[in-house]
Image (cartoon, rainbow, N blue to C red):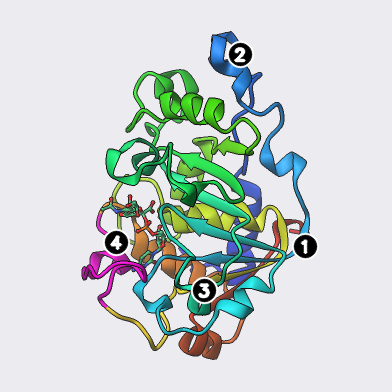
Amino acid sequence: RPKLSGPELLCQLKGGVKVATLTSDLQPFSELTWGSLLPQRSMTFDLGPFKSCAVVTSAGSMRHSGLGAEIDSHDMVLRFNAAPTAGYEKDVGAKTSVRLINSQVMASDDHHFLSSSLYSAGILVGWDPAPYSADLNEWYNKTDYPIFEQYQVYRKLHPQQSFHILHPHMEWQLWELIQGNMAEPIQKNPPSSGLLGTVLMMSLCDVVHVYEFLPSRRKTKLCHYYQSYYDEACTVGAYHPLLYEKNLVKRMNLGPDQDIYTHGRVTLPGLHTFTC
Ligand code: NCC
């Protein structure tokens, strides 16, 4: 099978991955008393398009990047999980428009999801590794972490904050795209928050810059820019097919390789900006 070009991969992404968040009219939520806490429309329906968006990974190589001002110059800035800005503004910026959080962060005690002010800025988007079929009923009864319980409590505590949950179709459609373009079999786990957030922003923005998903010359074993914890698996993956995700993004990158080396920056086009 021939290796697809960047534009061909972008078209596969546009045609094969439906970016959506859960809505209150979907089964089983439409029949649950708390279902009306979910938004009425998908996030991708209500928002955008924005001109420029930044996706800020949590990689240790963000440290000493000096990218803060550049990141903040974007119309929308997406961050992940418990990644802070306070104290790290020079390197990661101060603006948070969207925060994508996995269900482990939403549910585990050590993240204080319900009470920490870290999560109060911008739009929240949660996700949970769903069973491969991505059937909503099956997933609802078997989530990895209690994402829906936490969602209800959070919404009641912070009723004004916009909070979406990614439709699990997206995880597995993206996984299929990755596997379909790799020679070897890859582990059947959903993509990392990094790739999910990148594709989410590609559906909302004209141009997306992703920082330190493809490591720059600052590449380090430091896992996160905000913690003194060293583990190379953070960058190359263990549970998530991270290395394969990075390979795919490298092939779709429209920017020069020099941008990756010096800034850890990848440039991707918004999905609505090209035709296939
Ligand atoms: O580490 P994490 O990811 O929060 O990072 C967000 C995204 O940034 C990219 N990244 C991160 C570190 C690094 N050195 N290189 C990178 O490229 C990845 O794309 C990553 O997705 C996750 O994907 O949700 C993940 O979450 C953590 C953890 O749950 C949260 O940080 C909360 O503590 C996972 N770690 C563990 O479960 C121990 C991680 O595997 C994936």
Number of numbered discs present?
Answer: 4
Badge number at residue 273: 1
Query: Badge 3: few (under 14), some or many (20 or more) residues near its Cα, within 10 Å?
Result: some
Indicate the secondary structure of the residue bearing disc 4: loop
Query: Disc 4 and disc 3: Cα gap in Å?
Result: 26 Å
Residue 198 figure quarter: bottom right
Query: Which of the two labelled residues, at mark 2 and mark 3, occupies the earlier sequence position?
Result: 2
Depth check, mark 4 against mark 2: the one in front is 2
Tag 3 residue: 89
Residue 102: give x, y in percent of width and height: 41, 44
Query: Which of the two labelled residues, at mark 4 and mark 1, occupies the earlier sequence position?
Result: 4
Residue 46: give x, y in percent of width and height: 76, 40
Depth check, mark 3 against mark 1: the one in front is 3
Do the residues bearing badges 4 and 2 touch, measured as CB atoms within 8 Å?
no
Amino acid carrying label 1: it is: Thr
Tag 4 residue: 237
Residue 50 figure quarter: bottom right
- Confirm or reject: label 4 Cβ below 8 Å from ligand 1: yes
Query: Disc 1 and disc 2: Cα gap in Å?
Result: 34 Å
Query: Disc 4 and disc 2: Cα gap in Å?
Result: 37 Å
Task: Judge whether residue 27 can be spotted in this image.
Answer: no
Query: Badge 4: few (under 14), some or many (20 or more) residues near its Cα, within 10 Å?
Result: some
Tag 2 residue: 30
Amino acid carrying label 4: it is: Gly
Span shown in magenta: 221-238
Query: Which of the two labelled residues, at mark 4 and mark 2, occupies the earlier sequence position?
Result: 2
Query: Which of the two labelled residues, at mark 3 and mark 1, occupies the earlier sequence position?
Result: 3
Query: Which of the two labelled residues, at mark 1 and mark 2, occupies the earlier sequence position?
Result: 2
